[in-house]
Image (cartoon, helix red, strand yellow):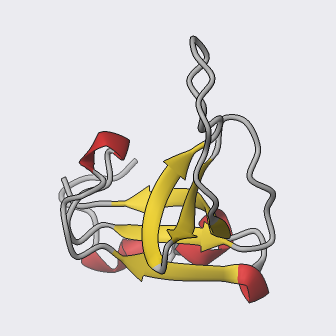
């Protein structure tokens, strides 16, 4: 039975959480990108957020990716054509699949 306040040193007894270990599947193919603008708020990506991007993953249904279109980075969701109507998709280069977005609350 413990009485009084816990020791300030008790947090040293617990193992720390390594976010790289939890959030990164392939270290060699993973990059971090800090967002400087507010262009991607429709994707819940805001200024100063950090994207964790895995370049080894395929861009498949349900995923969001960082792509290069006409020399500029853009965020794109798959499927890129609307379910209700088909429209031509502009060519792009897949830079990597966004696996996590880290932002401050």
Which one is in front, 70 or 59? Answer: 70
Residue 75 horizontal/vertical position (percent): 46, 57
Q: Is 36 positioned to the left or the right of 44 in the image? A: left
Residue positioned 79% across, 62% down in the render: 57
Q: Quadrant of residue 96?
A: bottom right
Q: Quadrant of residue 91?
A: bottom right
Residue positioned 56% across, 23% down in the render: 82
Residue 74 vs 80, above or below: the answer is below
Q: Is 105 positioned to the left or the right of 88 in the image? A: left
Residue 94 horizontal/vertical position (percent): 67, 67
Residue 80 visible in the current orientation: yes
Q: Is 73 positioned to the left or the right of 92 in the image? A: left
Residue 60 vs 69, above or below: the answer is above
Q: Residue furthest bottom?
A: 28
Q: Residue furthest front?
A: 88
Residue positioned 58% across, 16% down in the render: 85
Disc tally is: 0
Residue 87 vs 78, above or below: the answer is above
Which one is in front, 59 or 27? Answer: 59
Residue 15 visible in the current orientation: no
Residue 17 horizontal/vertical position (percent): 54, 70
Which one is in front, 105 or 83? Answer: 83
Residue 61 horizontal/vertical position (percent): 72, 36
Residue 88 vs 34, above or below: the answer is above
Q: Quadrant of residue 53?
A: bottom right
């Amino acid at each position: 039975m413990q009485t009084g306040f816990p020791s300030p040193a008790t947090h040293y007894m617990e193992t720390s959480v390594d976010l790289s270990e939890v959030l990164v599947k392939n270290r060699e193919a993973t990059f971090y990108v800090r967002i400087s603008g507010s262009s991607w708020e429709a994707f819940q990506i805001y200024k100063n957020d950090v994207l964790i991007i895995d370049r080894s993953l395929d861009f498949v249904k349900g995923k969001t990716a960082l792509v290069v279109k006409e020399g500029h980075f853009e965020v794109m969701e798959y499927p890129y054509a609307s379910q209700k109507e088909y429209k031509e998709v502009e060519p792009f280069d897949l830079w990597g699949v966004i696996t996590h977005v880290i932002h401050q609350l």
